[in-house]
Amino acid sequence: MRSNTTPEPQMSTSGPSSTPVETQDSLWEHFDNRIRETQMIHNPTADATVEVKKYLSDAFLPRTHDPLTYWKERAVIFPHLYVLAKKYLCMPATSVPCERIFSKAGEIICKKRSRLSPSTAEKLIFLNKNL
């Protein structure tokens, strides 16, 4: 008995030339996609560690230079540290809140209330300033 179908030629899988070009492209495409996915995943702790290490290896700022200018210039290099520097370096140094508390303590603890215990006086001052 003879078959009406002709046998199909079989491809040899022994060499690199036997792999179709489409398969190679999809393999590299898959590889590129995996690399992109890996780069998109960020670990905040690792990013912060790298940023702090970069900052610590940077040259010291001379005392005659303005620290706010320094941070403005390096905002792109140290984005997270820049936010912290802006927050804490822009705060004016003042003793006004402390002086207000001492004034209020002087009003609460007077000659007529000289027998207040320290814990009671502390609680009264706290309540007076925070309510």
Image (cartoon, rainbow, N blue to C red):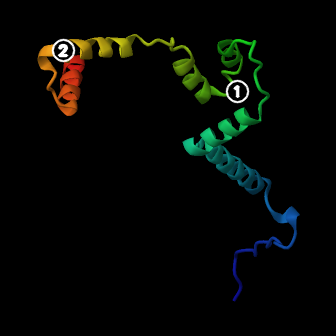
Visible in this render: residue 32? yes
Residue at 81 percent across and 70 percent down: it is 11
Q: Nearer the viewer, residue 29 or 5?
A: 29
Q: Which mark is residue 105?
A: none
Circle 2 — which element? loop
Question: Left of 109 or right of it: where is 18?
Answer: right
Residue at 61 percent across and 28 percent down: it is 81
Q: Which mark is residue 110?
A: 2
Residue at 23 percent across and 20 percent down: it is 130
Task: Tell me: residue 23, above or below residue 122.
Answer: below
Percent across and percent down for residue 100 are 32, 11
User: For the residue carrying disc 1, how many other residues have a C-alpha within 10 Å: few (<14), some (14-19), or many (20+)?
Assistant: few
Residue at 87 percent across and 62 percent down: it is 17
Residue wearing tag 1: 77
Q: Earlier in the sequence, mark 2 or mark 1?
A: 1
User: At label 2, which amino acid type do we have?
Assistant: Cys
Question: Which image quadrant: the C terminus?
Answer: top left
Q: Nearer the viewer, residue 9 or 114?
A: 114
Percent across and percent down for residue 37 are 61, 46
User: At label 1, which amino acid type do we have?
Assistant: Ile
